[in-house]
């Protein structure tokens, strides 16, 4: 990897890797061990999980057996909607730490902007950060109006906003808004669940660089200073998903990929958020 692969400096001056391993739907020890071990050997240093994934325990075992000291990894998780509605933010936070068998989070996020809850949740996040048990705090699935309300309520700007983002849903307005305010956009589902793996344009561009369509899509994200969290349990894919730092797309190629946008949401919306204003 080139030096570009390394890191973001967040708005709180902590450092976050640009590439992370997504672990959504990993449900067995064997898969977790293989994925984390392969990722670490390939150069990944960020592992992203969440309470609702119901796999923090197995991911914790994989992290603790990967051979790297804790301080060399960037571990993130998220508080779920139920805990927000119950006001059990601190309890959920500590349960996640316990399941992962770690002493602190590098980044802890509000998973969804639960109406009537997320501003209060954020105030608890501030206390957790002050306690030293989480270095950076952020949000996930927040639109512009959520971020504006959060700032109006607390005066604090999140370090990260993790959202679905990929060539088929480029989120230009949201990305521009966040980047102008020093909020790092981190893309989950950056592969759009495989929806663009056979895209003609991306395949054609890939021929030029000896890369796959997926690698072109990931490069397009990274080249916009968007973090990526590709998910896989396959060794070859885990390695190829981080192998996107040895070439640069041209301006015309970037623009052509921009035009693929069709507002495709490949990830589901939780049942308890259906009908809520989440855009």
Image (spheres, helix red, strand yellow):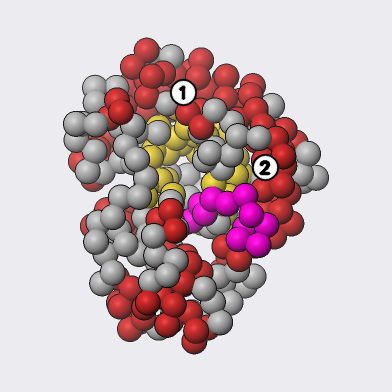
Give the x, y percent position of residue 188: 44, 49
Instruction: Give the left or right position of residue 63, taking residue 211 as reference.
Output: right
Give the x, y percent position of residue 225: 43, 63
Outermost residue to the front: 198
Instruction: Give the left or right position of residue 21, taking residue 158 as reference.
Output: right
Q: Earlier in the sequence, mark 1 or mark 2?
A: 2
Point 39% across, 60% down: residue = 195
Q: Please state which of residues 159 and 209 is positioned toward the viewer in this rendering.
A: 209
Question: Does residue 132 appear in this view?
Answer: no
Label 2: few (<14), some (14–19) or many (≥20) C-alpha neighbours in 10 Å: some
Give the x, y percent position of residue 48: 55, 42
Question: Which residue is disc 2 drawn over?
Answer: 31
Task: Give the label, 1 or 2, closer to the camera.
Answer: 2
Q: Quadrant of residue 145?
A: top left
* Magenta stretch encompasses residue 234: yes
Range of residues picked out in magenta = 228-238
Q: Quadrant of residue 169?
A: bottom left
User: In the structure shown, which secondary structural element does the residue marked by tag 1 occupy?
Assistant: helix
When the figure is inspected, residue 155 is found, relative to residue 82, above or below; the finding is below
* Magenta stretch encompasses residue 107: no
Give the x, y percent position of residue 239: 65, 62
Instruction: Give the left or right position of residue 169, taking residue 83 as reference.
Output: left
Question: Which residue is disc 1 drawn over?
Answer: 127
Question: Does residue 232 appear in this view?
Answer: yes
The answer to whether the residue labelled 1 contacts the one labelled 2, judged by CB atoms less than 8 Å apart, is no
> Could you tell me how far apart the alpha carbons at marks 1 and 2 are, in whole angstroms?
35 Å
When the figure is inspected, residue 37 is found, relative to residue 103, above or below; the finding is below
């Amino acid at each position: 990897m080139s030096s570009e692969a390394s890191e973001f400096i967040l708005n709180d001056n902590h450092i976050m890797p640009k590439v992370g391993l997504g672990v959504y739907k990993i449900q067995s020890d064997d898969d977790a061990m293989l994925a984390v071990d392969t990722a670490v050997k390939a150069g990944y240093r960020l592992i992203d999980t969440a309470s609702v994934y119901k796999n923090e325990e197995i991911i914790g075992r994989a992290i603790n057996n990967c051979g790297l000291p804790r301080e060399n990894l960037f571990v993130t998780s998220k508080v779920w909607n139920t805990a927000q509605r119950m006001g059990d933010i601190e309890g959920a936070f500590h349960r996640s730490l316990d399941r992962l068998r770690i002493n602190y989070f590098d980044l802890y996020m509000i998973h969804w902007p639960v109406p009537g809850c997320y501003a209060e949740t954020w105030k608890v996040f501030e206390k957790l950060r002050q306690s030293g048990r989480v270095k950076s705090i952020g949000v996930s699935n927040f639109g512009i109006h959520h971020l504006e309300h959060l700032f109006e309520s607390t005066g604090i700007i999140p370090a990260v906003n993790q959202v679905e983002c990929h060539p088929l849903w480029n989120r230009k307005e949201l990305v521009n808004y966040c980047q102008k305010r020093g909020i790092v956009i981190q893309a989950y589902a950056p592969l759009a669940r495989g929806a663009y793996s056979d895209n003609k344009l991306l395949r054609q561009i890939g021929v030029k660089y000896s890369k796959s369509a997926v690698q072109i899509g990931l490069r397009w994200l990274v080249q916009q200073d968007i973090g990526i969290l590709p998910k896989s349990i396959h060794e070859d894919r885990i390695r190829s998903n981080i192998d996107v730092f040895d070439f640069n797309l041209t301006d015309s190629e970037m623009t052509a990929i921009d035009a693929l946008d069709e507002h495709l949401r490949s990830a589901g919306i939780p049942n308890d958020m259906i009908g809520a204003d989440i855009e």
